[in-house]
Image: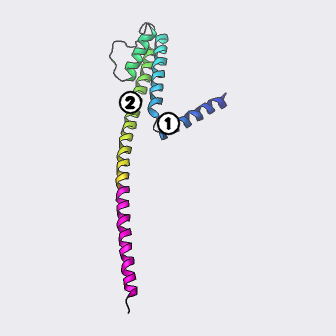
Amino acid sequence: MSFGVERIRTTLQQRTLAAVANRRVFPYLVVITVVTAVLTGVIAHVVARKDFPTVGIGIWWSIVTLGTVGYGDVVPHTGWGRVLGSVVIVFGVTFIAFLSAIVTSLFVDSDRAGEKAASYARHQEVLGLLQELKTRMDVLEKRDAARPH
C-alpha cells in the first residue's frame, strides 16, 4: 500500500516540477482550487447540515472562504465546521500568496528577458567594434611590414 502512495507522490512531485519549469502552474492551481472548493463544500454539507443545508451553499461558502472574502452570510457554528473553515482559510491564503508569487516571478522574468536582449545587442556591438579595430590593426601591421626598416 505504501508503495502505491509513494509512487503517486513521486508522480505528483514530477508533474509539479515540470509545471513550474514550463510556467504552466496556473491551470494546476485553478484545478486544485476548484476541486478543493467542491470537496470542502460537500464535506461542509455532510459535517454541518444545519449551517450548510445544501451542497450548493457549502460550495458557495467554500469559494468565498478560499477567496478570503468571507461575506458572513453562511458561517459554520459546529466544531468540525470551524476546523474545516480554518483549513479552507489557510489554503485560500496560501493560494493567493502563491499566485502573487507566480505573477511577480513572470514580471521579473520578462524584465530579465528584456535586459538580456539589450545586453546581447550591446555585446554584438562591442564585438563589431573589436572586429573593426582588428581589421584596422591588420592593415597597419601590413603597412608597417611593407616599409623598409
SS of the residue at dot 1? helix
> Can you name the residue that lies furthest to the bottom here?
149
Residue 23 painted magenta: no
Image quarter for residue 50? top left
Position of 83 relative to 110 (above/below) = above
Q: Position of residue 62 (x, y in %)?
A: 42, 18
Q: Nearer the viewer, residue 29 or 55?
A: 29
Q: Nearer the viewer, residue 91 or 35?
A: 35
**Magenta segment, prevailing SS (helix, strand or loop):** helix
Q: Nearer the viewer, residue 19 or 83?
A: 19
Q: Residue at x 41, y 29 (%)?
A: 95
Query: CA gap, disc 1 to disc 2?
Result: 18 Å
Circle 2 crowding by C-alpha within 10 Å: few under 14, some 14–19, many from 20: some
Q: Residue at x 36, y 69 (%)?
A: 132
Circle 1 crowding by C-alpha within 10 Å: few under 14, some 14–19, many from 20: some
Image quarter for residue 61? top left
SS of the residue at dot 2? helix
The kind of residue tagged 2 is: Ile
Image quadrant holding the C terminus, namely: bottom left
Position of 21 relative to 2 (above/below) = below
Q: Which residue is mark 2?
A: 96
Q: Which residue is mark 1?
A: 19
Q: Closer to us: mark 1 or mark 2?
A: 1
The kind of residue tagged 1 is: Ala
- Read off the magenta span: 119-147
Image quadrant holding the N terminus, namely: top right
Q: Position of residue 111 (x, y in %)?
A: 34, 46
Position of 21 relative to 76 (above/below) = below
